Amino acid sequence: MKLAKLFLFPTLFIVCVVYSSANFRVFAQTLDNQSVTNIAERESGDRFTISAKTRKGANVYAVSTQPSPDMLGAIDKGLDDLFAIARKHDYNRRLKHSDYTIYIALSDRQKDSDGNYSPDIAISAGQYGGSIYDQGGYIYAAGMVIAFKPCAFIIAEHDKNWNRVSDVVRYEGEHLVLYHNDRRLYKETADHSKSGGHPILN
Ligand SMILES: [Zn+2]
């Protein structure tokens, strides 16, 4: 199954990180918005001064300019796709757009090593240190889960390829849906340096 998917989407290579997945008890507590923003700023190196909402009610923060309607629409679509697949698995918790907060960080690269458009953020390597993703103390990630309550993650700013934005949103969201609905599967899949990638749910 996994291999078939890889062949279908040969250029879709998305690296994602769950913040402090080894220490998740600390982050199981409910955080206020400022605390989540502090984590997002520390991990991305950006300052989030702009707040916005998608048409369906997801909370969005950006660095310096209002996110484009295309970007906001792609976020909504990613969440729509996530919720549809979650319902198929009888997961019911945290399936509202307003349950989610997305930080749009400035991308630290525009293209991957194969030259494909792939805006990603550089974050410290952590559990990926020494792995094939390690670029010398940091890795390029398409997204990073930073809080469970509220459900929050960082993605990189895009100016095209909206399908990729939707995919990254759906994939980061998978960790959050699993955390709230299927803790066993969450734990099995949170650390991609030990397990497979996305999609986790089909
Ligand atoms: Zn992931």
Image: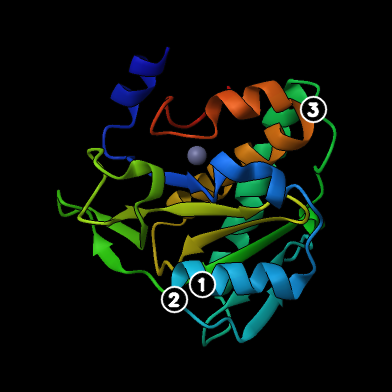
The one nearer the camera, 118 or 180, is: 180
Pinpoint residue 41: horizontal percent, then vertical percent.
Answer: 54, 74
Residue ID for mark 2: 45
Q: Tag 1: Cα neighbours inside 10 Å, few (<14), some, or many (≥20)?
A: few
Quadrant in the picture for residue 181: top right
The reply to whether dot 1 and dot 2 touch (C-beta < 8 Å) is yes
Spatial separation of the CA atoms under disc 3 and disc 2: 34 Å
Which amino acid type corresponds to the residue marked 1 in the rendered image?
Arg
Instruction: State the image coordinates of residue 5 (x, y, percent, origin top left).
Output: 38, 22
| Residue position for label 3 | 91
Rendered view: 57 above or below 148:
below
Instruction: State left or right for residue 183 relative to residue 65.
Output: right
Measured as percent of width and height from the top left, residue 78 is found at 60, 47
Q: Quadrant of residue 140?
A: bottom left
Residue type of the residue flagged with mark 2: Gly
Q: What's under tag 3, amino acid-wise?
A: Tyr
* Residue nearest the viewer, comparing 129 with 57: 129
Name the image quarter holding the C terminus.
Answer: top right
Q: Quadrant of the N terminus?
A: top left
Question: Does the CB distance between marks 3 and 2 fall below 8 Å?
Answer: no
Q: Which residue is mark 1?
A: 42
| Label 3 vs 2, first from the N-terminus | 2
Q: Secondary structure at mark 2?
A: loop
